[in-house]
Image (spheres, rainbow, N blue to C red):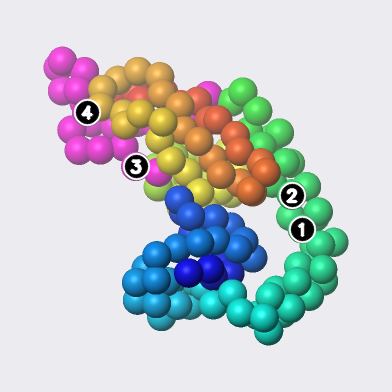
Amino acid sequence: MEVFLKDDVKGLGYKNDLVTVKPGYGRNYLMPQGLAVLADKTNKKIVAENVRQAAHKADKVKGDAQAIADQIGDMVLDIPAKVGESGKIFGRVTTLQLSDALKAKGIDVDRKRLSFDTDPTSVGEYTASADLHREVKHKIRFNVVAE
């Protein structure tokens, strides 16, 4: 079953992409949630027109994402966490904490666009990926430090 995505779906594609999915996934999840429309003749024309009209906006959005990536650069963030004697973290370091640390530096990145390369389990240096745009991805380095 071919569908057009109406919004970015993690692991599947980006807005206005034509993707092939299993019929049950398309009918029972993507379409009822408003994340996709069936790729028939009329919807193909509608999506093509939307893409054509949004082309100039896309350049601006990509430029904004690239500006955020440049602003982050090689910055290393410190994320405080409660730590035991062995250096192991109590609880968990989340993307929300990483997003808040970026916000404290004046960079606004939605937590849903962040993901850890490896889950932080102890004090040390880690990396996270920021999916700022379909063509702009950036690595963020951060240190987990004891509170």
Which type of secondary structure does the marked residue at label 3 adopt? Answer: loop
Q: Alpha-carbon distance for marks 1 and 4?
A: 41 Å
The three-letter amino acid code for the residue at tag 3 is Thr
Residue 68 appears anywhere in the view: no
Query: At label 2, which amino acid type do we have?
Result: Lys
Q: Which residue is mark 4?
A: 89
Q: Residue 84 placed where, x, y %?
A: 15, 23
Q: Earlier in the sequence, mark 2 or mark 3?
A: 2
For this rendering, which residue is in front, 72 or 53? 53
Q: In the rendered structure, are the residues bearing label 1 and label 4 in contact, judged by CB atoms less than 8 Å apart?
A: no
Q: Quadrant of residue 56?
A: bottom right
| Label 1: how many Cα within 10 Å (few below 14, some 14–19, many 20+) | few
At 81% across and 62% down in the image, what residue appears? 55
Residue bearing mark 3: 94
Alpha-carbon distance for marks 3 and 1? 30 Å
Gap between marks 2 and 3 measured at Cα: 26 Å
Give the residue pinned by disc 2.
62
| Amino acid at the residue labelled 1 | Ala
